[in-house]
Image (cartoon, rainbow, N blue to C red):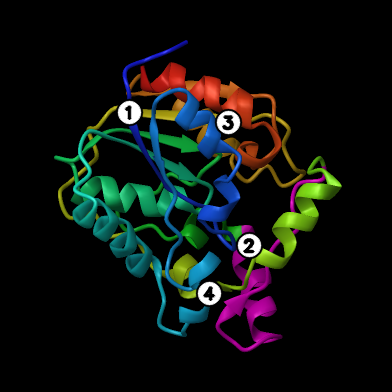
Amino acid sequence: MTSSPKTFLVSHGAWGGGFAWRKMHPLMQAAGHRLLTPSYTGLGERAHLAHQGLDLESHIQDMLNVIQYEDLRDIVLVGHSYGGMVATGVADRARDRVAQVIYIDAFVPDDGQSLFDLNESGRASSREAAKNGDGWRIPPMPPPPDTSAADVEWLSPRRVHMPIKCFEEKLKLQNGPLTLPRSYIYATRITPADTFGRFSRMTKSDPAWRYFEIDASHSPNVTAPEALMALLEQIAA
């Protein structure tokens, strides 16, 4: 399916960076779309800027600054995994610039919720992992088991420790409930924890959402880029 040119802005997942969307850039370009994949402060190519005070609000502000300085409008905002927390905050503050929000196997917070509120089982283990390190960062989780050896070799040295405050800080919506068009893509090759099953069930049963599934594990931008591209085009159109 082809559609009119769109601007896609990605809020990426934890431990990663814009680099993890490398396979999507030529696909977007070939389809005539613009894809922006900025890395948050302290992650990706900005890993040298990591510090103890980084939190969810820092990463929301990173994205809002990209919108401001690139003068982006009519944005298709994409939130992957932890990026669902970030994208929700961005959509709240930049409602006049965002046309729709697409969540990919992502957390969907309400006002006043943190990532740990939505993933209670990860709270204790993450704090323990941080305590065993420098006290304020969580080491990366391994890639999904169906990730190719070549992709693991590419990703692993680029994934860095995640500031725990990003998971602890509660989202503060400033403009009331989101009313923008929203879609959810659930990756059906789930890991045993099925962290995102609750959001799959919630969005599938809510008429305010459009619901889709992809035959991929948690990071289809890495393991199933062509299938993800087709789905993003379908939704954005």
Marks 1, 2: nearer the viewer: 1
Mark 1 vs mark 2, CA separation in Å? 36 Å
145, above or below 199, in the image: below
Residues at discs 3 and 2 in contact (Cβ within 8 Å): no
Q: Position of residue 184 (x, y in %)?
A: 47, 30
- Residue type, numbered disc 2: Gly
Secondary structure of the residue carrying tag 2 is: helix
Q: Residue at x 49, y 66 (%)?
A: 167
Callout 4: few (<14), some (14-19), or many (20+) C-alpha neighbours within 10 Å?
Answer: many
On whether residue 136 falls in the magenta region, the answer is yes
Q: Earlier in the sequence, mark 4 or mark 1?
A: 1
Q: Which mark is residue 47?
A: 4
Marks 4, 2: nearer the viewer: 4
Q: Residue at x 40, y 72 (%)?
A: 55
Residue indicated by mark 1 = 6
* Magenta residues (range): 121-145
